[in-house]
């Protein structure tokens, strides 16, 4: 899985990353989905252990262009996990109260507690992406946020949070197909916004912003993974494997049971 991990200091050029998945996609959808079922079961067991132990914290960050597959990844990768210990936090346009605080204020409130897994559907990285592309603040402001974010995530990591960040990488052609499907299929019309078309025209600007984000904020304590996301099954498979590997590395254990349980008789 290190193939997809952005190493600290790497200078990322996204046109060198194949959104179709390259050779790994040759395993095929059928075999990939079969392996996915095993990973779903393993993730379910590990998440239950995380919740039971109630010591570790896990934060998963998802970023992508419109139609990149964040919602679909959440549905499929986390299928079967215990909703008591997993929640999704979405970050939309800041409210007046949020705007009155620093940009990380609303984010910090959503970070996981002990035993909890939290998935950020979009995140604090919007403040170096859409804020940058639309020039909502001066360059002098957004450019210093990379270091601020690194420091924020380092603090979370030092306080016991495992952080995994996924950029779901799709091509412009794939985005076009997915947007068209939202228009053509009535049950998907609600997902379509004409604003998506305006954002699509800024593709090159967004790619530059994403490249800088990935290059400047992939750290040892909070790594980015560039996930080829044109093929949904492959996206789900790779994300699941990376998350399972990370959880297995936490060396979690169930709490010790009460003493004397072997003598308990339930009448």
Image (cartoon, rainbow, N blue to C red):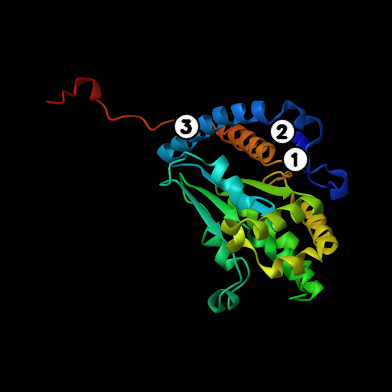
User: Quarter of the image holding residue 242?
Assistant: top right
Q: Which residue was labeled with disc 3?
A: 45
Say which residue appears at 50% left-offset and 42% top-offset.
56
Above or below for 137 versus 235: below
Above or below for 189 versus 266: below
Q: Which residue was labeled with disc 1?
A: 5
Residue, far top? 262
Tell me residue 38's x, y (percent).
Answer: 55, 27
Residues marked 1 and 2 touching at CB (< 8 Å)? yes
* Mark 2 surroundings within 10 Å by alpha-carbon count, few (fewer than 14), some (14 through 19), many (20 or more): few
Q: Secondary structure at mark 1?
A: loop
User: Quarter of the image holding residue 54?
Assistant: top left
Give the side of residue 92 with respect to residue 178, left or right: left
**Alpha-carbon distance for marks 3 and 1?**
25 Å
Say which residue appears at 11% left-offset and 25% top-offset.
267
Give the side of residue 77 with respect to residue 211, left or right: left
Q: Which residue was labeled with disc 2?
A: 1
Q: Secondary structure at mark 3?
A: helix
């Amino acid at each position: 899985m290190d193939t997809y991990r952005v190493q600290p200091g790497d200078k990322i050029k996204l046109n060198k990353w194949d959104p179709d998945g390259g050779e790994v996609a040759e395993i095929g959808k059928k075999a990939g989905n079969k392996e996915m079922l095993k990973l779903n079961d393993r993730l379910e067991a590990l998440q239950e252990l995380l919740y039971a132990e109630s010591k570790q914290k896990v934060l998963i960050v998802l970023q992508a262009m419109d139609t990149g597959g964040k919602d679909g990844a959440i549905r499929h990768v986390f299928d079967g996990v215990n909703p008591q210990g997993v929640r999704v936090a979405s970050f939309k346009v800041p409210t007046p109260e949020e705007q009155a605080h620093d940009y990380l204020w609303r984010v910090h409130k959503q970070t996981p507690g002990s035993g909890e897994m939290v998935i950020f559907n979009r995140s604090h990285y919007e403040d170096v992406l859409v804020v940058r592309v639309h020039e909502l603040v001066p360059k002098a402001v957004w450019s210093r946020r990379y270091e601020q974010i690194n420091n924020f995530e380092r603090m979370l990591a030092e306080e016991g949070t495992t952080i995994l960040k996924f950029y779901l990488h799709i091509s412009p052609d794939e985005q076009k197909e997915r947007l068209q499907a939202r228009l053509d299929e009535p049950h998907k019309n609600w997902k379509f916004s004409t604003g998506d078309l305006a954002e699509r025209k800024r593709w090159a600007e967004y790619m530059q912003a994403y490249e800088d984000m990935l290059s400047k904020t992939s750290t040892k304590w909070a790594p980015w993974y560039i996930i080829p996301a044109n093929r949904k099954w492959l996206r789900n498979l790779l994300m699941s494997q990376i998350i399972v590997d990370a959880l297995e590395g936490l060396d979690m254990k169930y709490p010790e049971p009460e003493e004397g349980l072997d003598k308990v008789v339930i009448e």
